[in-house]
Image (spheres, rainbow, N blue to C red):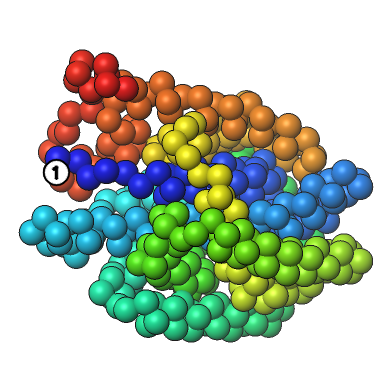
Amino acid sequence: MTAPRIVALDFLRGAAVLGILVANLPGFALPVAAYFSPAAWGGQTPTDIAAWAITYVLVEGKMRGLFATLFGASMLLVIDRADACGRNGAALHLRRMATLFAIGCAHLYCVWSGDILSLYALVGCVALLFSAAPLRLLLFAATTCLLLALANGLAIAGLGSVVERVFGRSTPADLTREIAALRGGWQSNVAWRWHEEAGPFTAFLANGPETLAYMLFGMAGLRSGFLTGAWPRCRYALIAASTLLTTLPVFALVAAHTIARDFDAHTIVVASFVAAPLLRPVTVAGYAALLLLVAREGRLAAAGRVALSNYLGCSIALTALFYGWGAGQFARWDRASLYLLLPPFWVAMLVWPRWWLARFTQGPAEWLWRCAVRGKWITLRRSFCERDAK
């Protein structure tokens, strides 16, 4: 018998996957350096700079952090439920991470270089070591990981020419090569990602500590009842107000300083990798508390139930729009115009899950993942009785 779903987790996951799309749009449409800097590509009009600033203050790293937090909570839930049924929860988790790593690598090399699934799979294996840890140890370990992430940021800031190439104004030759590769056919896209983009193990070294911190916070949030909506509403309201009113103004000041420095590469690194790691988890907690005040069954929760399908579906649709194997629009849009894509994509991400889940037990990508983990074909279509109940 399938265990009951926790609506609060689905609702949060749905909000996170919609928010991740906001952060990812420049990564699909613009050269890699432009993800962090309008000065690299994508226009420097007031509208473009405002789009960057709003995204930096409200979204960058926060939605990814919330998604990783929920990943940690979900992995612990799967392990605990498996153990409670007499199965080996740790073995099940490792099979899930192995298959997720394969899915992530296929996504990374065949579709889009901004994949997070392979990173989550690697970090998830480390997080397993803490699956039986008490609440205080989880919080201590997560804080330690944040300090390691800060050290990583300081190390990145000291890389000199690498900082300028990745976070600053790339040379015309580098930009020409990247644009030509991604406007080319699918084979040239794959070759570019294979030779030029960071692989999953490099991402693990660079982003693993911060990602592990979020997963551990997620495990603590599940254990404490925070992420399941079990706390009093007044406490969620207090957490949301105190955290967001404290951290978002700081992010706004950092954004203003970055603009005033004309998007100097070292300033960008400090903004995203030194100043942010210790602040972002506080903002993530605030967003989670705010969302839990309004969490309910509905379209957003349904979107969260098929978050993997939504995430991969966005990658396929947006690379079809921007890369050469599709419409070839890469590096042709300014930054501000990209956000015109949000309304139709959000509508699609919210509309199809309700229709799909009324007929099928889970999202298509979730189903494929589950089949791979179990090593057998699992029925996807709901029975007529189940559909009538819906």
User: How busy is the neighbourhood of tag 1: few (under 14 within 10 Å), some, or many (20 plus)?
Assistant: few
Quarter holding the C terminus? top left
Quarter occupied by residue 53: bottom right
Task: Decide which of 8, 83 is in the foreground and name it.
Answer: 8
For the image shown, how many numbered marks are present on the structure? Answer: 1
Task: Decide which of 171, 30 is in the foreground and name it.
Answer: 30
Q: Position of residue 222 (x, y in %)?
A: 38, 62
Q: Position of residue 4 (x, y in %)?
A: 27, 43
- SS for dot 1: loop
The image shows residue 97, relative to residue 381, as above or below, that is below
The image shows residue 136, relative to residue 233, as above or below, that is below
Q: Position of residue 112 (x, y in %)?
A: 51, 45
The image shows residue 159, relative to residue 304, as above or below, that is below
Q: Quick check: 41 left or right of 135?
A: right
Kindly tell me whether residue 185 is visible in this rendering.
no
Q: Quick check: 318 left or right of 93?
A: right
The image shows residue 264, relative to residue 363, as above or below, that is below
- The residue located at (25%, 55%) in the rendering is 78
Quarter holding the N terminus? top left
Q: Quick check: 34 left or right of 295?
A: right
Per the image, the residue denoted by label 1 is 375
- The residue located at (37%, 82%) in the rendering is 137
- The residue located at (22%, 45%) in the rendering is 3
Task: Decide which of 89, 260 is in the foreground and name it.
Answer: 89
Amino acid type assigned to the residue bearing label 1 in the image: Gly
Q: Position of residue 121 (x, y in %)?
A: 35, 59
Kindly tell me whether residue 262 is visible in this rendering.
yes
Q: Quick check: 369 left or right of 189?
A: left
Query: Residue lying furthest left in this view?
Result: 86
Task: Decide which of 163, 68 is in the foreground and name it.
Answer: 68
